[in-house]
Image: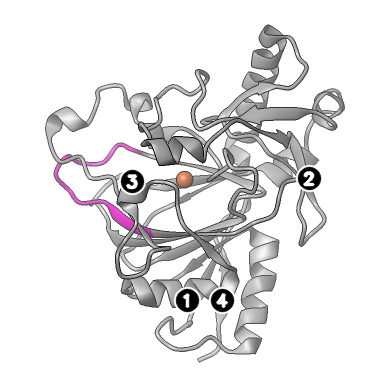
């Protein structure tokens, strides 16, 4: 069966129908998928749920997997596959103020590393009956449409990223010593050039970007606040309604994402995830 690729929104994303994720992907199909990935920044491959090794096999077509930081989320069967469980197991686990749930904060995966993951693959294994959408926003388009004055302000600037920042509303999970050792502060450009497309995008992680280098703290906060508002304009967003088995593959170099954490207590929400190795942002 031939592949069909359908755009999911005006902002970003395309759906892939007709790919048998349990067989090898042909060279021609892979070329079509890679092309669509660069054009749309996010692919939703409609699939049945896969075992961790099967999911790893499919994802390896798109890049080299890396181990994720948090040890206790790694699976035994395929170490590059992490299980992310976001179920509210008790009523107390779901705060009244949902901004206190870390997942609800906009971010790009892994930017606290010198060499962050270029892409993330996430498959839905258990999906609640309402809420729980993953929202994406297109920071390449946000850069293209920046007012000149703001573009000049950020074009050659760098920013400090860290495992956590006082700027994020909710705190990141505590790390063990080994994990702490792997997460020193790092510096990234505020605008990065995509190594495959050559296009520029705002590279800012509201959950992890702490401050702009060589800028007065109040001015830095003001600039980052304005950027945060700009990159998450509704026009740049696509909200994904999960179906069990969906595999989302997205480009962390030009998208940010967050989760609508308003879903019912006691309903399971679980995904498996693989991060794909990237290059140092420039
Ligand atoms: Fe994420």
From the viewer's perspective, is residue 210 above or below residue 78? above
* Residue underneath mark 4: 61
- In contact (CB < 8 Å): disc 4 and disc 2: no
Q: Which residues are magenta?
A: 261-272
Query: Between marks 1 and 2, how big is the CA–CA gap?
Result: 29 Å
Residue 20 seen anywhere in this rendered image of the structure: yes
- Number of the front mark, 3 or 2: 2
* Residue underneath mark 1: 58
Count neighbours of disc 1 (C-alpha within 10 A) and say few if under 14, some if 14 to 19, many if 20 or more: some
Sequence-first tag of 3 and 2: 3
Sequence-first tag of 1 and 2: 1
Query: Between marks 3 and 2, how big is the CA–CA gap?
Result: 33 Å
Mark 3: secondary structure: loop
Instruction: Tell me if residue 266 is in the magenta stretch.
Output: yes
Q: Nearer the viewer, residue 122 or 13?
A: 122
- Number of the front mark, 3 or 1: 1
């Amino acid at each position: 069966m031939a592949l069909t690729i359908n755009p999911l929104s005006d902002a970003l994303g395309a759906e892939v129908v007709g790919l048998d994720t349990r067989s090898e992907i042909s060279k021609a199909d892979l070329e079509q998928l890679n092309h669509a990935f660069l054009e749309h920044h996010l692919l939703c491959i409609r699939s049945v749920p896969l075992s961790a090794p099967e999911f790893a096999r499919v994802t390896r077509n798109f890049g080299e997997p890396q181990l994720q930081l948090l040890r206790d989320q790694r699976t035994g069967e395929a170490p590059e596959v992490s299980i992310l469980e976001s179920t509210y197991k008790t009523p107390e686990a779901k705060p009244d103020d949902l901004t206190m749930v870390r997942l609800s904060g906009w971010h790009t995966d892994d930017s606290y590393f010198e060499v962050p993951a270029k892409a993330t693959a996430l498959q839905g294994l258990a999906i609640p009956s309402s809420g729980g959408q993953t929202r994406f926003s297109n920071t390449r388009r946000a850069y293209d449409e920046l007012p000149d004055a703001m573009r000049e302000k950020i074009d050659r600037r760098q920013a400090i990223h860290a495992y956590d920042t006082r700027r994020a509303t909710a705190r990141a999970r505590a790390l063990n010593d080994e994990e702490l050792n792997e997460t020193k502060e790092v510096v990234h450009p505020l605008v990065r050039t995509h190594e495959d497309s050559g296009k520029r995008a705002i590279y800012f992680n509201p959950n992890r970007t702490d401050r702009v280098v060589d800028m007065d703290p109040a001015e830095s906060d003001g600039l980052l606040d304005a950027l945060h508002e700009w990159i998450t304009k509704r026009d740049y967003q696509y909200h994904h309604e999960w179906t069990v088995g969906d595999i989302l593959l997205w480009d962390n170099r030009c998208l940010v994402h967050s989760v609508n954490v308003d879903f019912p207590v006691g309903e399971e929400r679980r995904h498996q995830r693989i991060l794909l190795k990237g290059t140092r942002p420039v």
